[in-house]
Amino acid sequence: SAVISQKPSRDICQRGTSLTIQCQVDSQVTMMFWYRQQPGQSLTLIATANQGSEATYESGFVIDKFPISRPNLTFSTLTVSNMSPEDSSIYLCSVGGGLANEQFFGPGTRLTVL
Amino acid sequence: DQQVKQNSPSLSVQEGRISILNCDYTNSMFDYFLWYKKYPAEGPTFLISISSIKDKNEDGRFTVFLNKSAKHLSLHIVPSQPGDSAVYFCAASDSNSNSGYALNFGKGTSLLVTP
């Protein structure tokens, strides 16, 4: 499986500001994904980060709020824009694994918005 | 709308005994199911998976059973060890949907294995 790192590991931010989370993989991967886990909830897919094209967002998530970059096959960023306390979550990136639906996750970024 | 449900938020089992974690799903189009294990401050770690064409998959101490008619799957850990104490997430996907790679997760079951 790929080794995935995320920066920052945690942050505390003021409402109205934006935070960019980085995801780095130690090998080239085709599929990269961004998930959110709100307190007490399950992991929810935000979007699929496509290399060389715009990200594909799931229902309820929009590019203006969660812009994503995927400049190459080993790196992606997720920005949480104009943050509110409701954005306090753990944000995780994942990559597709050997089997079609198997994914491997980074350690996550714990975001608290005051 | 929660399509994958883990109705037991927590489970406590003695070391050496069997741990059984349950998961139910509502979407009959799901054709691939996975279990993840998560320790605090870490991302989920893939544990075991099963395709809808099978009803059982085994990997060492971990076995996943799938009952498609009941839309139910379970993870059996035998024998349970204290190091198995973690939150276990059930996930499912529909490989034929537009979001074929999207994993739908349950809320997790916190397993505690006591010595």
Image (cartoon, coloured by chain):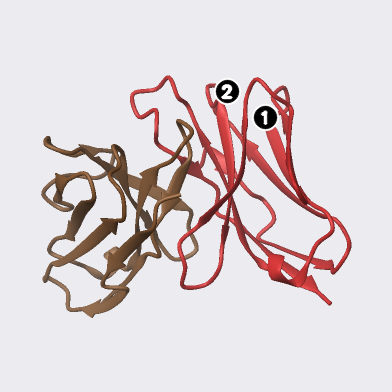
Per the image, the residue denoted by label 2 is: B28
Residue annotated with mark 1: B71
> How packed is label 2: few (under 14 Cα within 10 Å), some, or many (20 or more)?
few
Q: Are marks 2 and 1 in contact (CB under 8 Å)?
A: yes
Q: Residue at x 63, y 49 (%)?
A: B6
Left or right, A53 with reference to A2 = left
The numbered disc on residue B15 is none
Query: Which quadrant of the figure has residue A20?
Result: bottom left
Say whether residue A30 is left or right of residue A54: right
- Chain for colour brown: A
Q: Amino acid at mark 1?
A: Lys
Q: Residue furthest front?
A: A27
Identified at 55% across, 68% down, the residue is: B39
Q: Is residue B49 left or right of residue A54?
A: right
Q: Label 1: chain?
A: B
Q: CA distance from mark 2 to mark 1?
A: 7 Å
Quadrant in which residue B78 is drawn: bottom right
Where is residue A100 shown, x and y percent of the image?
45, 30
In which quadrant of the rendered view does residue A3 lie? Answer: bottom left
- Residue type at mark 2? Ser
Residue A36 percent location from the top left of the image: 36, 56
Q: Is residue A63 visible?
A: yes
Horizontal and vertical percent for residue B107? 55, 54
> Which residue: 44% across, 66% down?
A39
> Mark 2 falls within which chain?
B
Q: B44 or B25, which lies in front?
A: B44
- In the rendered image, what is the letter of the chain coloured red? B
Which tag, 2 or 1, sits closer to the chain's start?
2
Q: Secondary structure at mark 2?
A: loop
Q: Residue A86: in sight, yes or no?
A: no
